[in-house]
Image: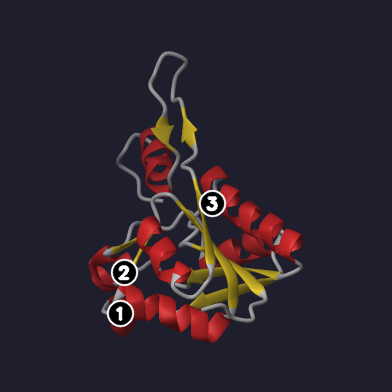
Amino acid sequence: MTRSSDTVIALGMFDGLHAGHMAVINAAIELAKAKGARSMVYTFIENPRSVLGSAPVPLMSFEEKLRAIERTGVDEVRAVHFTRALADTSPDEFVEALIRDCSPAAFVCGEDYTFGAKGRGTAEVLKQLAERHGIRTVIVPLVTVRLSPDSEPVKLSSTLLRELKRSERGGNESF
């Protein structure tokens, strides 16, 4: 089944807006331009882990995150509250709601993206679910960094940035 669509949607929490997040957002912006579509970042106001347990300290406030995302040149930011009901939504239901509410031409996510109840949805699951509706999914490879010249590359993530910030401060300070 194909559908009339006008939005390329970058999916993620985007806490800290580091190079990995920028790779996802920039891929969505570029794909939208190529398709003559609008670009959108779909994110959450609060960290999902705040509903599911304990959330880490954010790397930036929601307002800072919103301003940083808007500076990327994306056409729209859709920030929604992460609720218990949303946490209990199946991957299928989540994708169906995105399709119904956002009219996607395509989805863009990182290789490690998860969604839906208990994180059962993965980037590959998103791709399969979207393909049922004739919607393309672009999976952006992880961005890696070397913490020292002779170290193995590690995934750039908000968790890594928190750990580095904590070690910078001696590990005892909250931030």
For disc 3, the neighbor class at 10 Å (few under 14, some 14 to 19, many from 20) is many
Secondary structure of residue under mark 3: helix
- Residue 16 position in % (x across, y down): 51, 53
Q: CA distance from mark 3 to mark 1?
A: 24 Å
Amino acid type of the residue that numbered disc 3 sits on in the rendered structure: His
- Label whose residue precedes the other's in the sequence (2 or 1): 2
21 w.r.t. 114: above or below: above
As drawn, the label of residue 21 is 3
Query: Label 2, on which residue?
Result: 50
137 w.r.t. 134: above or below: above
62 sits to left or right of 50: right
117 sits to left or right of 23: left
Q: Residue at x 26, y 79 (%)?
A: 88
Amino acid type of the residue that numbered disc 2 sits on in the rendered structure: Ser
- Residue 124 position in % (x across, y down): 38, 57
Q: Is residue 59 visible?
A: yes
Q: Residue at x 35, y 62 (%)?
A: 125
Query: Label 1, on which residue?
Result: 89
Q: CA distance from mark 3 to mark 2?
A: 20 Å
- Residue 64 position in % (x across, y down): 59, 62
Depth order, front residue of 129/81? 129
Depth order, front residue of 169/50? 50
Amino acid type of the residue that numbered disc 1 sits on in the rendered structure: Thr
Q: CA distance from mark 2 to mark 1?
A: 16 Å
For disc 1, the neighbor class at 10 Å (few under 14, some 14 to 19, many from 20) is some
Mark in front: 2 vs 1: 1
Q: Residue at x 48, y 79 (%)?
A: 98
- The quarter of the displayed image where residue 56 is located: bottom left
- The quarter of the displayed image where residue 107 is located: bottom right
82 w.r.t. 74: above or below: below
Mark in front: 3 vs 2: 3
- Residue 6 position in % (x across, y down): 67, 76
